[in-house]
Amino acid sequence: MKKHKLIVTALFVVLIASFTVLLSLGSDIYREKPPVPAAYVGADGQTVFNQGDIEQGQLVWRSMGGHQLGSIWGHGSYVAPDWTADWLHREAQAWLDITAQQRYGKDFANLTPEIQAGLEVSLRDDMRHNTAVVSAGGKAVVPLSATRIQAIERVSQHYIALFGNDPRLAELREQYAMKEDTLPSQERREKLIAFLFWGAWAAISERPGLGHTYTNNWPFDPQLGNTPTASNIVWSILSIITLIAGIGALVWHHASGRHDPLPKPDEQDPLFFTKPTQSQKAVAKYFVTAIALFLLQIFLGGITAHYAVEGQNFYGIPLSELLPYSVVRTWHTQLAVFWIATTWLGTGLYIAPALSGYEPKYQRIGVNLLWVALVVVIFGSMGGEWLGIQQYFDLDMNYLLGHQGYEYVDLGRLWQVSLLAGLVIWLLLVTAAIKPAFTKQAEIRPVIWVLYSSCVAIGLFYAAGLFIGKHSNLAVAEYWRWWVVHLWVESFFETFATSVIALMLVRLGLIRACSANGAVLSATVIFLSGGLIGTLHHIYFSGVPTSVIAWGAIFSALEVVPLALIGFEAMQSYRLHNAAPWMVRYKWAILFFVATALWNLVGAGILGFLINPPISLYFVQGLNTTATHSHAALMGVYGMLGIGLMLFCLRGLSSNLAWGDKYLKGAFWALNLGLAAMVFMSLLPIGLTQFFSVLEHGYWYARSPEIIHSPLVEGLVWMRVPGDIVFAVGGLLLGIFLIDLWKKSLLHTVGSPMTDGLTDRVSS
């Protein structure tokens, strides 16, 4: 018990220290964010762009899908270019051509290398020098040279034509998977240009008194002087040293620790004769909904991948007019969070009464109403996003009901608030059901407290997304967005899953309560030690001060440390499925937990650290290396885990029925092999191809049609087809398994646990 108290104390220290650092650095980001000047002006005082243009342009960018159509500062989708890098390259080429014509009467490409080098020095002097002047009113005004204003005008005309329907750029729009008239309004296109210019200006303008830009010299473009900073390289080396030291310490701790032998399981399944409560029966519909959303996500993922090779068309069908790429990708990424979260929310509602043996009054009604609200938010937000991207809303209405433009928090503000309200209701339902367990289950109380604390965090931390306001500076918006994506989706759901699995295994008599207490508390401390501050590795180049690189590099390396020994967890989980004859009933739930552990090592560990160090992310942010990690980690870890939790809960709802193991066996192997093929036959090779292109030509080139639509990359995209098909078959088999289980429940004797369970979802 003394050891447990020490671990609990360590947990509180980690939480307090980590959030102190996060909030302190957040304060620095607010103070040192790239400024939005009152105006960019010419030598004659003429205004090129003003603050209002930029703020409205940001709303326009959000309305067309934001991160789902190209990227800004490396964050977003991968088919269209990174608009920051693309703008900088186009502006630089325009500046060089204008200057070459003025001085030598030739295009820049026709000059000698010596003259070209001299002009590039002048280019860097003009573009990198921060000319912001603070007026008497405290507002910054940025004078621009006449040559730069001419270059900006050329780039602006290109984007006005691109986001409209100029036939000269029809092929380029198809390569970018952009629909015709992405922004039908000329006024909106002009406002968008102001925002895109501001993002590029922040990426090339040096911070006052420092030798690097607001985005820490990202994107890589040697012609413009954007190369890795010294801090980037130093903290990358230190992060690798931290990783090695952390793994060494963890191996030593694991080797020197006392490992209690597993208890002898009961002769019969302890849960076999447990009758589900009314609210637990109602939870079945959550799992049916989750798999339906999963299948829809798979379908949309196939369309998203196809856009990378056929642009606007889908086998000759002009699909982009009805379902633009930005809509399809929005739904694909958002549904990933929705279906996985639905399985975990259902698990929480199922496990709480199981732990306490108590069914609160009106609990079933609450579970049913929450499900209705969840479905309304999911499909209501999807409809709003479609209307927003199709430009049916004005900018204010789009912000409220349409598309907010930020990946994983795309849904309009009212839908966002509604989802938060639903999470709070879920927390209240879990609280009401689990409360008696704090006194009844004394031997496992520490794990229950960890479980409940993670439920509180899941219920409340989604609110971090509400700190992104209508006109929030992009650097501030990225800071809060990653609170949602990393802290909410990754950190606290991971803690929830660890404690839930431990409680399930204790209930089955497969591990001792005292062992579970120590293991869960220790794992939570180790994981959160790196996981909370490790959030910062996502925003190295998002207009933040250099201190963020230092903290993020060290603690994102610590995130990977516990994954080094994940193989032990996988083997221990695998042995459990043969621990007793009756464990065959839980075989596939256990095997999905094993898959979770292995993908944790590969997807979150190896592929995560591939892009975590600052020097690595500097070159590969926003390339398909990011997609490699996100697919392997989100589906491989959280998706497999969600399926495992769902199967465990369904086992309790169908205790008297034989399962269609052939469907589960097929689903298990198809999902895992399909995901592996998708990652290693397509996404990773594409990312590495782009990586070489960045090093040879600059970041802009790796995101250009010359690479994205090169024969090599398009061939690698087609290599996704085998893996995608196998993966889709796995999803279908999982759906068939549920249908088969439902049919058996209908034929089963009325009054059995399964009849009261899955068939109850129809009446409730």
Image: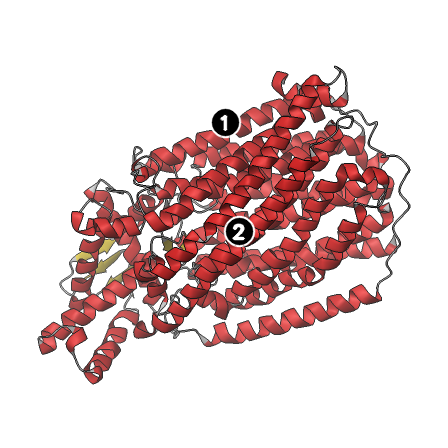
Name above or below for residue 492 compared with residue 682.
Answer: above
Residue 381 as seen in the image, left or right of residue 519 = left
In the structure shown, which secondary structural element does the residue marked by tag 1 occupy? Answer: helix
Q: Residue 684 in the image: x percent, y percent?
A: 49, 60
Name the residue nearer the viewer: 463 or 234. 234
Note whether residue 670 is visible.
yes
Badge 2 amino acid? His
| Category of crowding for the residue at label 1, using alpha-carbon neighbours closer than 10 angstroms: few (below 14), some (14–19), many (at least 20) | some
Please name the amino acid that badge 1 sits on. Val
Please determine whether, in this image, residue 110 is positioned above or below residue 273: below
- From the viewer's side, name the closer residue of 550 and 154: 154
Relative to 294, 184 lies left or right: left
**Left or right, residue 94 beside residue 446:** left
Farthest residue to the left: give it.
105
Instruction: Place residue 323 in its image quadrant.
Output: top left
Which quadrant is the C terminus positioned in? top right
Which circle marks residue 472 in the picture?
Answer: none
Residue at 21% over, 78% down? 119
Label 2 SS: helix
Q: Which residue is mark 2?
A: 631
Q: Would residue 486 be seen by someone viewing this image from the given angle?
A: no
Q: Residue at x 64, y 25 (%)?
A: 367
> In this figure, which residue is indicated by the disc labeled 1?
376
- Expressed as whole percent of the image width and height from the top left, the position of residue 525 reads 72, 56
Q: Which of marks 1 and 2 precedes in the sequence?
A: 1
> Which residue is pictured at 52% across the width and 28% down the height?
375
Q: Quadrant of residue 331?
A: top left
Q: Cα distance, mark 2 to mark 1?
A: 27 Å
For mark 2, does the 10 Å Cα neighbourhood hold few (<14), some (14 to 19), or many (20 or more) residues?
some
Position of residue 200 measured from the top left corner of the image (x, y, whole percent): 31, 61
